[in-house]
Amino acid sequence: MKREKLYIFDTTLRDGEQTPGVNLTVDEKVQIAKQLERLGVDVIEAGFAVSSPADFEAVRRIAKEVKNSTVCSLARAVELDIKTAWEALKEGHKVRIHTFIATSDIHLKYKLKMSREEALRRAVEAVKLIREVSEGRAEVEFSAEDAGRTDLKYLCEVIEAVIEAGAQVVNIPDTVGYAVPDEWYEKILYIRENVPNIDRAIISVHCHNDLGLATANSLMAVKAGARQVECTINGIGERAGNAALEEVVMAIKVRPDQFPVYTDIDTKQIYKTSQLVSRLTGVLISKTKPIVGDNAFAHESGIHQHGVLECPETYEIMRPSDIGLTESKIVLGKHSGRHAFKKKLEEMGVELSPEKFEEAFRKFKELASRKKEIYDVDVELIVEGLEGAKEKTYRLLYNQAVSGEGIIPSATVKIATPQGEKLGLAVGNGPVDATYKAIKNALSIGDEVQLRDFKIRALTAGTDALAEVFVTIEGNGFRVSGRGVDPDIVRASALAFIEALNRLERRKSKRSGV
């Protein structure tokens, strides 16, 4: 099967920023654009240059600073929009102006108050103007807004005319997320077969997710011959959002038997890009979000866990490493079986006799029937209960942290050790970071111990709520956890860290036979 390139057009910075409540700064847009470039996106729609001075500046800076991806600005089929877009893009390396006009009868009648003939004339004039003002330097993309509800014969007439005028990409958007997959496939196929000069342009699609079908519609369009998909990271965008880049790209990667195309996306950058966009936009990712959600590579069912531990392909159609993660997550819960529990003990460096293991597993199942989430520290407590009470190597005697606006966060701790009391001081990025560094300084452990996980939650309501902190640390080949509870978040964090350090010392002593 001969494979053709599928171009990935990312509109996170334009349509994605239209997500209600999202407002990115220019610097944040540039940061995301550079990550999209590392991801291997072919076209970055950096904004709508005429819409605001901030959008103009974002498009200008991204066009100047991005070297490998084409940078695009949206523009209505209006002279001011097109000339402003070119002003923003003209210093760029590879640039595109994406012009559009609505073509559906409902938009023409109620929004534009324009005839079909007038819309067609405006579309052609806009394409010609882009070529004129940019002197042929800017690629030209034309979108027939609300193509999904546009009369097909008229749509083909518009597409033929704009290609003749110089459009290199013709975008067929399902602007309101109205289409269903079979219908969308037939529409793209009809355009391919009924526009005489379609071989002179790339067919693109831009699908919205109002019915939850954006990714499915995009993939069906690819099957029908579309060779550019417009999408966003995490599927963010107007209303219910857009086709998600990560879903489109991974579907093509996982099912090459279904799609005769390839992309230049570095999929190992997907998770990192997803997290960056989520953090800067403030749009949280659902745990069950395909590809990048917390549960996408997590398994709790005992049957699934057994299969994945024996051979990941039994329940995983892609590897976590494909998107930039290190490993799958085996989540312990009431559905987990012996294989998962044994694997967790092995990860923690715990060795139990067959009899002790069965007792520990029984206690684990009892706890899991009462508790929604089982943390590593819960397993630690089960094991310690079998082994009896243990002497604590370290005890937190005193801690103080200072932070605030204009103040460098700093911390002081005093810890009781077998060698006497130890004092530690440090500065950090915040009070908890400074406290952890102070504890490391007090115990002279430097980089021997690394923090691998940190979770915090409120046990009670109100501003005086008890804070419960869970940490996981790694050192000397062991991974252990600790839990701390205190009304003071910083002290709870310190207690959790000290408890984890005590467990680490016990593991080291047990291995050395002391």
Image: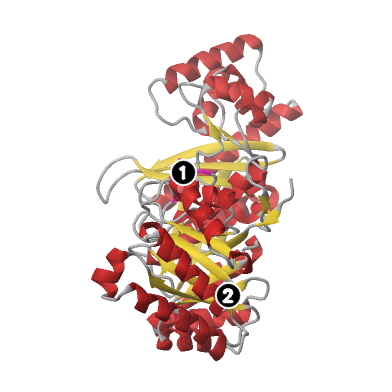
User: Quick check: is 58 in the magenta stretch?
Assistant: no
Apparent side of residue 101 relative to residue 277 in the rendered image (left or right): left
Q: Residues within 10 Å of mark 1 (few under 14, many from 20)?
A: few
Q: Is residue 80 above or below residue 148?
A: below
Q: Main secondary structure of the magenta part?
A: loop
Q: Which residues are magenta?
A: 285-290
Apparent side of residue 35 relative to residue 486 in the rendered image (left or right): right
Does residue 286 appear in the picture of this structure?
A: yes
The answer to which image quadrant residue 241 occupies is bottom left
Quadrant for the C terminus in the image: top right
Front residue (pair 299, 209): 209
Residue picked out by circle 1: 182
> Mark 2 or mark 1, which is nearer to you?
1
- Say the numbered circle drawn on residue 390: none
Q: Is residue 174 above or below residue 213?
A: below
Between discs 2 and 1, the one toward the N terminus = 2
Residue for point 51% across, 75% down = 162
Residue for point 46% across, 68% down = 157
| Residue 138 image position (x, y, % from top left) | 59, 81
Q: Residues within 10 Å of mark 2 (few under 14, many from 20)?
A: many
